[in-house]
Amino acid sequence: MSLGPVSTFLRHHYRHFNAAALIDAADGYNAHLQQGGKMLVSMAGAMSTAELGLSLAEMIRQGKVDIISCTGANLEEDLFNLVAHKHYVRVPNYRDLSPSDEQALLERHLNRVTDTCIPEEEAIRVLERVVLEEWQGADREGRSHFPHEFMYRLIRSGVLQDRYQIDPKDSWLVAAAERDLPIIVPGWEDSTLGNIYTAHCMKGDVRRVHTVRTGIEYMTFLADWYRRNAYEHSVGFFQIGGGIAGDFPICVVPMLEQDMEEEHTPLWGYFCQISDSTTSYGSYSGAVPNEKITWGKLGQDTPRFIVESDATIVAPLIFAMVLNQ
């Protein structure tokens, strides 16, 4: 198979150091899939606001991703961008902002994420109004759903469609909804919509706090998914950034093996992390992959890769190689 232009460029120029690690990680990803493996992708940080959907959505459509773990921020921010993209404000000189400059952004209801401001009224409040109806409807009927399932219901209902401001093919969440991809959202409460949901529960707009399922139920959901898949198809782990999006799902293996006492639970069959976190002071995010062997997550023969660089640069390039672009 002939290489696409991006892959051709990368193979010619990316020969050493982190560049070479990127190539090795992409080759390992492809090899894992070609051997019949499945892949979990975890997303930390603000990758949705970085518009990772431009590449991740195609990975999902082509079956290169089988399950996603992401922060609540990444879940909601893909939809924020979908419905309010034209209202986003870029601040390229963000390093030079003074406290009074930041206050001025606040007064314009612009929530800054590095060089990009999310507009509160056009993004956050628009989504709040429609998802509140979903929460309240489920609450009245005694239904409970995971955070990602509520987002899927919004997408499939078409209630947001007239508000789309980007091509929906560039939304990774739309692609995931089309495939009914399983998503894990650990710590969803630590997100804008999580805070908003809490407020509506406190005000009595939603009576049953467990109308939105979270935490322990997500781990149970993941454990069931892993049991159904890992014995027949080795499951790989592709981690973008650090934090709970990666730490939560990778623990499902030792939980099943050690706490459920299910002997011979298959280990993760591939591991790659893109991170610029410093390996010091007990940092989980900066821990080298070998440390995970001691926790019963990876084996000594598991293909392991770490690319110490900016995930907004590296992840789209690895995806391009997996897609042979």
Image (cartoon, helix red, strand yellow):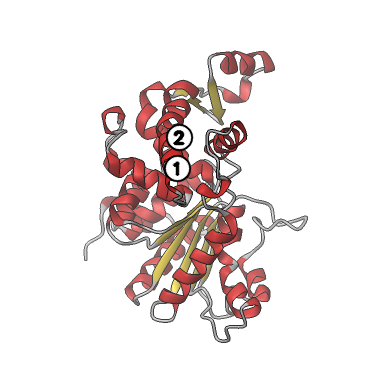
Q: Is residue 171 above or below residue 104?
A: below
> Which quadrant of the structure image shows residue 14?
bottom left
In the rendered image, the residue lying farthest to the left is: 1
Q: Nearer the viewer, mark 2 or mark 1?
A: 1
For mark 2, give the secondary structure.
helix
Measured as percent of width and height from the top left, residue 318 is found at 40, 55
Q: Earlier in the sequence, mark 2 or mark 1?
A: 2
The crowding category of the residue bearing disc 1, from other C-alpha atoms within 10 Å (few below 14, some 14 to 19, many at least 20), is few
Crowding at dot 2, Cα within 10 Å, few <14 / some 14-19 / many 20+, comes out as: some
On residue 140, the disc is 1
Q: Residue furthest bottom?
A: 263
Seen in the picture, residue 183 relative to 197 is either above or below; the reply is below
Return the residue nearer the eye: 23 or 40: 40
Q: Residue 161 occupies which quadrant of the picture?
A: top left
Q: Nearer the viewer, residue 277 or 267?
A: 267
Kind of residue at disc 1: Arg
10 or 122, nearer to the observer: 122
Which secondary structure, mark 1? helix
- Residue closest to the far right: 281
Q: Does 244 sit left or right of 317 as displayed?
A: right
State whether residue 301 is above or below residue 130: below
Left or right: 158 as drawn, with respect to 306: left
- Residue at the spot x=59%, y=44% of the render? 189
Residue at 47%, 76% (x, y): give it. 227
Does the image show residue 285?
yes
Q: Quadrant of residue 24?
A: bottom left
Where 115 sits versus 14, above or below?
above
Specify the label residue 132 is tagged with.
2
Q: Residue at x 38, y 28 (%)?
A: 85
Say if mark 2 contacts mark 1, CB within 8 Å.
no
The answer to whether residue 242 shows anywhere in this view is: no
